[in-house]
Amino acid sequence: MTEALMNLIPAHQFSIEELTNAYNRTRTDYLIPMPMNPGRLQEYITLYDVDLQASQVAIVDDTIVGLGMLGVRKGMGWITRLGVLPEGRRKMVGSAILQALLDGATAKKLSDVWLEVIFGNHPAHELFRKFGFKETRELIVARRPPQTMRNLSAIRDVSKVRYLQHDEVIELHCKRQERMNWLNDAESMRNVRLLANNPFLEESEPFPQHEATRLSGMSVEFLDGSLGWISYQVTTLQLKRISIEVNRGNPQRVTEGILELLHRLHSSQDAVIENIPDDERWTGFKNAGYFEVFRRIEMVHRAA
Ligand SMILES: CC(C)(COP(=O)(O)OP(=O)(O)OC[C@H]1O[C@@H](n2cnc3c(N)ncnc32)[C@H](O)[C@@H]1OP(=O)(O)O)[C@@H](O)C(=O)NCCC(=O)NCCS
């Protein structure tokens, strides 16, 4: 019955409050609780180039039963926030939304459509496989509480530190060779500036607006010629959007040294990293006090 009555409507026809409310209702039983408020959803839409006209809301009898969003960048797509209300599941609503998002991507001639699914989210993982998405890699979400632990040996060999402004950091992100995940791509970093225009920010955030709208960075050289840089966003309570590139030298040691400098500079903040690959840098993060919270599986759907 549900299938016959269901309609898909572009998400831009709904208010941010309606979309937030619907999203939260699809996630009441989610593996990792991630409730949003309108400010956070607006921030998410801005940072990750979500196209609300190409995003879909499923309606049955005037009630929202599910939704899904499509990010659009440089010929690529990204599916996010897909969810169906618990009482509406296993009735092909998720499939209908996903198909509409993929059709939208095809209409826009997007070659690859990416997404991430939390490790252990069997229903969603199965759904994406059924639609031809293939696993590419595992990505880690991790945190570090503020702590007094010091690792002097990690920075003993630092020879030069240069502090970087937002625009310099963006240039470095643009030159990066490594394929970044959608969340950490240069475009997401560039969009941090746009957060100043978020009309919901002041009422929803516990920090002044100016703190949220730029990235900081450091370029660090070591006595043996090792070299790397970090970029991050500073807020009163948290360091976020942390990203490290190691240009020369041992990735683990360079990462550890850079992080020791960062956390000496910002010793009172909690730190969060999202979607970093399980490589040598991750060992450096762990040695600097980060612990894994959960993993995501990155998947891609390539146009035929
Ligand atoms: C994942 C989700 C969107 C699926 O929506 P849905 O409307 O129930 O899915 P459908 O009825 O269209 O199912 C399509 C396919 O998905 C897979 N699937 C869906 N639910 C499943 C389950 N509980 N167990 C195993 N496979 C499942 C199956 O392959 C199914 O095909 P089949 O019915 O032929 O076996 C829904 O479970 C949900 O909202 N979960 C919570 C939010 C979430 O996890 N979002 C995804 C974040 S990445």
Image: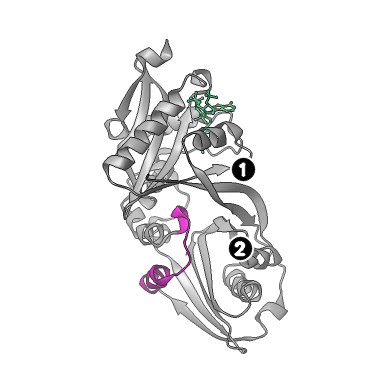
Question: Does the magenta segment cover residue 169?
Answer: yes
**Residue pushed farthest top?**
1
Q: Do the residues labelled 2 and 1 touch (CB within 8 Å)?
A: no
What residue is at 57 percent from the left and 71 percent from the top? 262
Residue range in magenta is: 166-184
Say left or right for 118 vs 147.
left
Determine which residue is flagged by label 1. 119
What is the CA distance from the residue labelled 2 to the residue labelled 1? 31 Å
What residue is at 47 percent from the left and 60 percent from the top? 180
Q: Which mark is residue 268?
A: 2
Badge 2 amino acid: Ser
Looking at the rendering, in which quadrant would you find the N terminus?
Answer: top left
Determine whether the residue tagged by mark 2 lies in a helix, strand or loop.
Answer: loop
User: Which residue occupies the foreground of this view, 154 or 72?
Assistant: 72
| Residue 116 point in image, percent of width and height | 51, 45
**Residue pushed farthest front?**
304
Viewer can see residue 26: yes
**Quadrant location of residue 175?**
bottom left
State which tag comes first along the sequence, 2 or 1: 1
Say left or right for 148 vs 267.
right
Viewer can see residue 52: no
Say left or right for 47 vs 128.
left
Q: How many marks?
A: 2
Question: Does the magenta segment cover residue 200?
Answer: no
Q: Which of marks 2 and 1 is in front?
A: 1
**Quadrant location of residue 67?**
top left
Color scheme of the displayed model:
one colour
Query: For mark 2, does the 10 Å Cα neighbourhood hold few (<14), some (14 to 19), or many (20 or more) residues?
Result: some
**Quadrant location of residue 237?**
bottom right
Looking at the rendering, in which quadrant would you find the C terminus?
Answer: top left
Answer above or below: position of 288 versus 293.
below
